[in-house]
């Protein structure tokens, strides 16, 4: 990993940009994660710092497809090609803009209070984020900056997906990037510490910059608190013993038990990345192998969904007996065949599961139990994973619970494309948070 944290990334980025020191330049951070990086850049260049708040305007029937973007000061940037091909009328565009502008104004007031944003007309502007996967938000921000009259727009990031960097170079006057790895799953993979940045931290950094106050070496956030528990464990399940890893953040609001797919394990970099994102959102995670090393070589056992589901249920009960997890709502995150096991286990009448997320799952393997599921269920599938996508569509039609099918555009089965895994993690995080509720962990701070 090239960066320790956002402070380290910002300091290194500031050195790369030092030729701008003393120029008529403004540094803008994309909230929230881009602001700690931008703060270090602004300090290194002795330049003013502000946030750049933008909202993408999604096509009504396909929100992931941007038909434009809006910024403060009534700025509207239209994507004429998308508007034309999607047959979006001016009235439809205006309706989406009105809705998104209300949220944009709310966020701007949240970060700045009553202070006006910095003027950009005629100035060089450096737009900073903590990393770029697809680049859609960064591109929208740069378009808004241009529309606000900036003389020159520089996009500066610590790390960027290689294909996104090639595309963004044509949209800005200059792209400054420290790392452009060929294999890019998510921004957080390139940081040792990548906890969520809070609104409070953004506000504090803006106020420090305005007063000329240095930030502490590690910006204080709740995410930096050591977890209540971070243990390698081994559980007796039936006649076998299964290894796992349990992480319980302070003030956890729920616990997510992972069910891995065939050929995977608790060491899966994809599931470990998702787990880190969930931990940053205040969710405990339990990654455990459902099969022993010997069992993994048996195709019959690998696809014995009923066996896997039974073990998953036992593992969940084990977690509920642990003091740090006793009062936490339990959820399942399943991948491939593991997703079938999660659905099967959640369908049990006494399961008491708060929510299920399936990543590239095989719900068809749980077909006999789909109609019995009463748990809110999110099915996440890559847009290019055509066979699995069709299986998930068929399974969704049989569900009788609250459910959603989320398709990650351009992603294949393992979500290896730039930004794909990041979208998976964000979708899962939001689904779990929405359904476990804000239930403070009684063993955490303030108990």
Image (spheres, grey):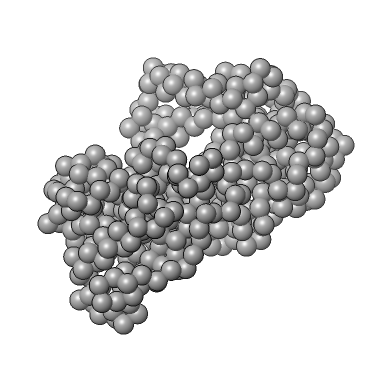
Residue 374 in picture, x, y percent from top left: 20, 44
Q: Is residue 256 visible?
A: yes
Q: Which residue reaches farthest front?
A: 447
Q: Is residue 402 above or below residue 237?
A: above
Residue 430 in picture, x, y percent from top left: 41, 41
Residue 354 in picture, x, y percent from top left: 30, 45
Q: Is residue 205 above or below residue 99?
A: below
Instruction: Report the side of 295 relative to 395 (left or right).
Output: right
Residue 313 in picture, x, y percent from top left: 26, 60
In the rendered image, which quarter is residue 105 located in?
top right
In the rendered image, which quarter is residue 233 located in?
bottom left
Q: Is residue 232 above or below residue 41?
A: below
For the image shown, how many numbered marks are present on the structure?
Answer: 0
Q: Considering depth in this image, is 12 or 417 the residue closer to the camera?
A: 12
Q: Residue at x 82, y 46 (%)?
A: 18
Q: Residue at x 64, y 37 (%)?
A: 201
Q: Is residue 82 visible?
A: no
Instruction: Report the side of 276 relative to 121 (left or right).
Output: left
Q: Residue at x 37, y 52 (%)?
A: 326
Q: Is residue 280 above or below residue 268?
A: above
Q: Which quadrant: the N terminus?
A: bottom right
Q: Which residue reaches farthest right?
A: 22
Instruction: Report the side of 63 relative to 183 (left or right).
Output: left
Q: Residue at x 62, y 33 (%)?
A: 200
Q: Considering depth in this image, is 160 or 169 the residue closer to the camera?
A: 160
């Amino acid at each position: 990993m090239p960066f320790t944290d956002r402070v380290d990334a910002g300091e290194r980025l500031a050195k790369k940009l030092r030729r701008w020191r003393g120029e008529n330049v403004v540094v803008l951070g994309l909230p929230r994660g881009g602001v700690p990086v931008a703060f270090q850049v602004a300090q290194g260049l002795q330049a003013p710092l502000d946030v750049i708040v933008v909202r993408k305007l999604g096509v009504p029937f396909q929100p992931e497809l941007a038909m434009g973007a809006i910024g403060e000061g009534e700025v509207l940037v239209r994507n004429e090609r998308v508007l034309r091909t999607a047959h979006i009328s001016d009235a439809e565009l205006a309706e989406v803009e009105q809705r998104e502008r209300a949220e944009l104004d709310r966020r701007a007031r949240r970060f700045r209070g009553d202070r006006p944003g910095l003027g950009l007309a005629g100035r060089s502007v450096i737009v900073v984020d903590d990393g770029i996967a697809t680049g859609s938000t960064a591109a929208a921000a740069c378009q808004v900056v241009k529309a606000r009259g900036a003389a020159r727009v520089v996009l500066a990031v610590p790390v960027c997906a290689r294909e996104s960097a090639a595309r963004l170079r044509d949209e800005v006057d200059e792209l400054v990037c420290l790392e452009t790895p060929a294999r890019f799953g998510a921004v957080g993979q390139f940081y040792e510490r990548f906890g969520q940045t809070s609104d409070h931290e953004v506000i504090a950094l803006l106020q420090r910059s305005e007063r000329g106050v240095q930030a502490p070496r590690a910006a204080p956030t709740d995410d930096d608190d050591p977890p209540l528990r971070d243990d390698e464990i081994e559980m007796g399940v039936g006649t076998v013993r299964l290894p796992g890893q349990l992480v319980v953040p302070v003030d956890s609001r729920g616990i997510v038990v992972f069910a891995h797919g065939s050929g995977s394990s608790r060491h899966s970099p994809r599931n470990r990345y998702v787990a880190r994102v969930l931990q940053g959102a205040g969710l405990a995670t339990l990654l455990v192998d459902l099969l022993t090393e010997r069992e993994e070589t048996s195709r019959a056992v690998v696809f014995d969904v009923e066996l896997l589901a039974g073990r998953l249920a036992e593992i969940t009960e084990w977690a509920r007996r642990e003091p740090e997890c006793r009062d936490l709502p339990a959820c399942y995150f399943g991948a491939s065949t593991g997703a079938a096991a999660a659905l099967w286990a959640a369908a049990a009448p006494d399961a008491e599961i708060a929510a299920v997320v399936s990543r590239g799952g095989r719900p068809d393997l749980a077909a006999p139990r789909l109609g019995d599921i009463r748990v809110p269920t999110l099915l996440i599938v890559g847009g290019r994973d055509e066979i699995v996508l069709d299986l998930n569509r068929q399974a969704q039609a049989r569900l009788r619970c609250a459910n959603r099918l989320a398709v990650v555009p351009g992603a294949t089965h393992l979500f290896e494309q730039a930004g794909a895994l990041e979208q998976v993690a964000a979708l899962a995080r939001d689904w779990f948070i929405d359904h476990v509720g804000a239930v403070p962990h009684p063993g955490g701070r303030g108990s």
